[in-house]
Amino acid sequence: MTDQHEGPKAAWIRRHVNYQDVECLIFPFPLHKDGYGTLGLDYKVIYAHRFMCHLVHGEPPTDQHQAAHSCNRGNDGCVNPQHLSWKTPGENHKEAVWHPKIKVGVEAAKAIRDMKGVEDVSVTAARHDIAEITVRQIQAGRMWTGKGRAARLFTDAQVQRIRSLKGVRGKVQELSVEFDCSDHIIWKIMNRKTWAHVPEVSLTS
């Protein structure tokens, strides 16, 4: 891919090729209806995360390889180069189970933090059956800190009740007060952005 006929979106991607933070890097431009970022390059429209993966890892091994996200937040607009790699469709599907949506647990989080600098991240991730990006974020103190609102746990019943009130005027604010968390946390639960592993309530007559 050349730098001919590229606009500000492609230029922004190039400026962030060496992005080092473990957290997701969200494409700052309007996203496609599927949630992914797109840009124009050489008179073609391509996905922003695929362009980033190409810049960081070179050409894909085959035309069938996909630019896969270890964070599973591609459809939220993530283009973090550390989260991207070329995967076959089968490998990409397997990695689509995003472990940060699964309850790690306070004790497991402490054990993960204790392993920082002691063993490779991949070993810790395999032992706890979570993604490597989850291990990095826990060890960096960005999640499961055990302090404040970020550590708030919800039961399945609470998650289901929160979801059941989606669309009811004023409920986001009421629930955030009830559960001592931010409005954004309640909104994400309502919209299955978090706690997606909790099933919907079965309605019976």
Image (spheres, rainbow, N blue to C red):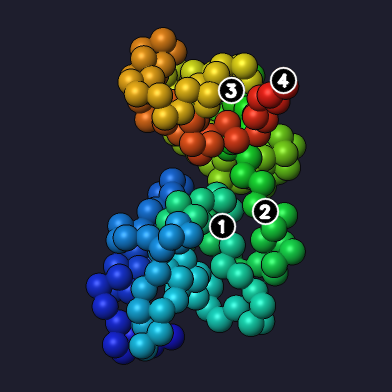
The residue under label 1 is: 69
Q: Nearer the viewer, mark 1 or mark 4?
A: 4
Say which residue label 3 marks.
160
Q: Is residue 11 left or right of residue 164?
A: left
* Number of the label disc, if any, that sits on residue 205: 4
Do the numbered discs 3 and 2 sit on residues whose CB atoms are within 8 Å?
Answer: no
Q: Is residue 106 above or below residue 85?
A: above
* Tag shown at residue 8: none
Identify the image quadrant of residue 110. top right
On the image, which quarter does residue 128 sit in? top right
Q: CA distance from mark 3 to mark 1?
A: 28 Å
Give the number of the disc on residue 95.
2
Q: Quadrant of the C terminus?
A: top right
- Residue 61 visible here: no
Q: Amino acid at mark 2?
A: Glu
Q: Look at label 1 and name its amino acid.
A: His
Foreground pick, 61 / 44: 44
Secondary element under disc 3, as helix, strand or loop, is helix
Q: Secondary structure at mark 4?
A: loop
In percent of width and height, residue 184 lies at 37, 30
